[in-house]
Image (cartoon, helix red, strand yellow):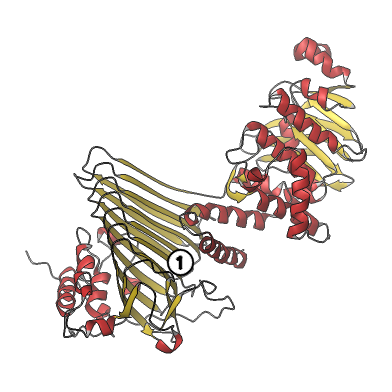
């Protein structure tokens, strides 16, 4: 599914390398988690894979089902089946959430040569998915993320994920800013999308999200590289001993 | 020392300043004298330094007529339609001049009468608006305009009065003057649409009595080479409401002046506009709001989207006189510059003599928000479409000033059409 090979990337404006050779393979249906201290390059990995501006890829490759993502615009990557749930979902005043969702869904369908959803079919679908995430009609009507609470923003990310039905979902610190109940709701939304084929990459600082979204593999990232990989027990080790011990051990 | 007036001959070319007989004569003569005193505007004049008046002063403007399969703006709304072609009223293309709670007649018919209520307004509000800033094109209009309408709302006027300015000649110059009076408690909506002529000069004087409510929605024609110099002079009585919104799409030169004065307490006024320009496009909003009454609220909300060397100008002033306590004045002008060649020139001004007021102003210009672009694109929306969404979102704050959902949607639709054509 997703293959990241020796990915090295720098900030465009500072000539500072952030990713120093990331290797990661995620197969269909797997859930991987990346953990690591602040500044280790977790979020940067997600941005570079999704195609955010401001980074230069120095070396390496990223493919999704064999397609070279690095040569694609962000919208093409999305149409190819990639989805990034943002750590800080962007507020867009003046663009209605519904308009946004419908434009996104139909853009992807169009890009894939599928028929666009008509208004009625779209509405039915979005209501059904929104209900499961406790997103009410009022929230759908409001401008994208404007005036949303932290929890509402994250639920809105998951709603987009549910509507777009990507193959590969990256969740960038989706647990940040969430209370326990909100985190449960978000995790339920994610788990509902686990169907044995769809893959997930969960980026987080803390073990607690992984109690709800159970990973198959856990990777520890430090200074722009994945330094240790293992099973779910690795996350517990982090939780109990912190990163310092683990990183010393690796060094 | 007598200052020699700058040459006004090119302004008067093609128009006859010959005085009419009757009540309007004095105002026309005075306006002509005023024009000759101030002279034609020059680049060195403070309020023309961002907009070169020479375009509007050329004797023979020409503008190709835009062929379009779009339906006329406001076509789907119930209205009293009044059509002008190249600046001349076309009775055969217009609806009958009747309306509930509405007195309506042509300016020509009104001026032919011996006595008329319009005498209290015609040229009066315009000349009041000449101080402290001279507005020579408005004086010109009063001095020579023979076309236009005189409207009086005596109660709630149910159908909007829709002035549609169409074109048939490439080089026509139009001079249109409307006089509008709203009696106490009356309600009136006025639409204006179309390019009207190669160059159109409009002057609208609006007297809004206490508790009356005046709404104005305008869509200026999108012929690329057309020129427009427009004026609104409004006086607001106690607890009255004045709302004006202008949509500008294309045009070589547009200068929209609005001069409002609060004379009664507790009144509210909004002047708003959204404009989009690509290439040879110069658009200027020049607003002057005078608070001379207690507890009035004024809003100026202007949004401009500019690309390919298009130029946007905003000159907005709020003057709060010493007795105008509890004034709430708000002013925002923002430009979205799509590329490095676009230009936005803004001059927000506050002049406040009362001590218990709230006045805020903001003026910004910037490029498309890259984070928002990435967010939209990461959901599969192509770059051009994402840009369109953000352009329309940017303009929406101004459109929200339109107090009617259907009209606001009409404006949104026109802007969406523009963004699709200008990718």
Q: Where in the figure is residue B317, as x and y percent of width and height? A: 30, 52
Above or below — where is B271 with respect to B30? above
Within 10 Å of disc 1 (Cα), the crowding (few <14, some 14-19, many 20+) is many
Residue at horizontal 82 percent and vertical 49 percent from the top: A80
Which image quarter holds the N terminus of chain A? top right
Number of callouts in the render? Answer: 1
Q: Nearer the viewer, residue B147 or B77?
A: B77
Callout 1: residue from which chain? Answer: B
Task: Say whether residue B7 is visible.
Answer: no
Q: Where in the figure is residue A116, as x and y percent of width and height? A: 78, 60
Which image quarter holds the C terminus of chain A? top right
| Circle 1 residue | B281
Q: Where in the figure is residue B174, as x and y percent of width and height? A: 35, 80
Q: Nearer the viewer, residue B71 or B49?
A: B71
State which quadrant residue A177 falls in: top right
Q: Nearer the viewer, residue B41 or B18?
A: B18
Above or below — where is B33 with respect to A199? below
Q: Where in the figure is residue B34, as x and y percent of width and height? A: 16, 71
In the displayed structure image, the side of residue B32 where residue A30 appears, left or right? right
Residue at horizontal 67 percent and vertical 54 percent from the top: B383
In the displayed structure image, the side of residue B33 where residue B255 appears, left or right? right
Above or below — where is B356 with respect to B297? above
Residue at horizontal 75 percent and vertical 36 percent from the top: A46
Task: Say whether residue B16 is visible.
Answer: yes
State which quadrant residue A137 falls in: top right
Q: Secondary structure at mark 1?
A: loop
């Amino acid at each position: 599914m997703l293959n990241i090979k020796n990915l090295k990337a720098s900030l465009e404006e500072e000539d500072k390398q952030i990713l120093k050779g990331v290797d990661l393979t995620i197969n269909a249906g797997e859930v991987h988690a990346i953990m690591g201290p602040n500044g280790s390059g977790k979020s940067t990995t997600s941005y570079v894979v999704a195609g955010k501006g401001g980074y230069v890829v120095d070396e390496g490759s990223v493919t999704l089902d064999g397609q070279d993502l690095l040569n694609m615009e962000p919208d093409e990557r999305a149409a190819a089946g990639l989805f990034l749930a943002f750590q800080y979902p962007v507020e867009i005043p003046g663009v209605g959430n519904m308009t946004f969702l419908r434009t996104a869904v139909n853009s992807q369908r169009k890009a894939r040569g599928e028929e666009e959803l008509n208004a009625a079919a779209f509405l039915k679908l979005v209501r059904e998915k929104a209900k499961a995430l406790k997103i009410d009609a009022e929230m759908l009507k409001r401008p994208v993320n404007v005036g949303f609470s932290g929890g509402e923003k994250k639920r809105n990310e998951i709603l987009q994920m549910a509507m777009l039905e990507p193959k590969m979902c990256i969740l960038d610190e989706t647990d940040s800013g969430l209370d326990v109940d909100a985190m449960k709701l978000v995790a339920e939304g994610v788990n509902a999308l686990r169907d044995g084929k769809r893959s997930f990459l969960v980026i987080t600082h803390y073990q607690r999200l992984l109690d709800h979204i159970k990973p198959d593999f856990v990777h520890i990232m430090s200074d722009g590289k994945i330094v240790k990989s293992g099973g779910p027990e690795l996350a517990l080790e982090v939780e109990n001993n912190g990163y310092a011990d683990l990183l010393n051990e690796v060094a | 020392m007598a200052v020699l007036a700058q040459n006004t001959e090119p302004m008067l070319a093609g128009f006859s300043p010959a005085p009419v007989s009757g009540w309007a004569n004095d105002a026309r003569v005075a306006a002509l004298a005023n024009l000759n005193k101030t002279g034609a505007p020059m680049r060195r004049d403070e309020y023309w330094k961002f907009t070169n008046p020479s375009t509007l002063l050329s004797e023979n403007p020409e503008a190709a007529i835009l062929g379009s399969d779009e339906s006329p703006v406001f076509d789907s709304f119930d209205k009293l339609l009044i059509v002008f072609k190249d600046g001349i009223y076309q009775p055969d293309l217009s609806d009958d001049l009747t309306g509930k709670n509405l007195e309506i007649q042509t300016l020509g018919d009104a001026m032919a009468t011996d006595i008329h209520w319009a005498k209290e307004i015609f040229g009066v509000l315009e000349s009041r608006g000449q101080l402290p800033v001279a507005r020579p094109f408005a004086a010109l209009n009063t001095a020579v305009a023979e076309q236009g309408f005189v409207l009086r709302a005596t109660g709630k006027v149910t159908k909007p009065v829709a002035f549609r300015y169409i074109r048939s000649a490439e080089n026509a110059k139009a001079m249109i003057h409307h006089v509008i009076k709203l009696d106490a408690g009356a309600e009136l909506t006025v639409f204006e649409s179309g390019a009207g002529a190669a160059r159109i000069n409009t002057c609208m004087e609006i007297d809004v009595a206490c508790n009356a409510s005046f709404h104005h929605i305008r869509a200026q024609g999108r012929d690329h080479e057309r020129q427009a110099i427009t004026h609104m002079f409004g006086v607001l009585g106690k607890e009255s409401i004045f709302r004006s919104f202008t949509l500008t799409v294309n045009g070589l030169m547009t200068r929209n002046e609005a001069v409002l004065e609060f004379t009664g307490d507790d009144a509210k006024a909004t002047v708003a506009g959204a404009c989009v320009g690509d290439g040879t496009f110069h658009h200027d909003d020049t607003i002057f709001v005078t608070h001379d009454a207690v507890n009035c609220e004024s809003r100026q909300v202007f949004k401009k989207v500019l690309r390919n060397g298009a130029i946007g100008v905003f000159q907005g002033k709020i003057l709060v006189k010493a007795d105008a306590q509890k004034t709430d004045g708000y002013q925002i002008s923002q430009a979205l510059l799509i590329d490095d060649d676009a230009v936005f020139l803004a001059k927000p001004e506050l002049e406040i003599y009362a001590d218990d007021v709230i006045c805020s102003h903001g003026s910004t210009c910037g490029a498309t928000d890259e984070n928002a672009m990435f967010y939209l694109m990461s959901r599969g929306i192509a770059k051009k479409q994402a840009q369109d969404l953000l352009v329309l979102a940017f303009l929406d704050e101004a459109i929200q000033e339109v107090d009617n959902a259907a009209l606001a949607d009409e404006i949104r639709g026109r802007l969406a059409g523009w963004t699709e054509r200008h990718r």
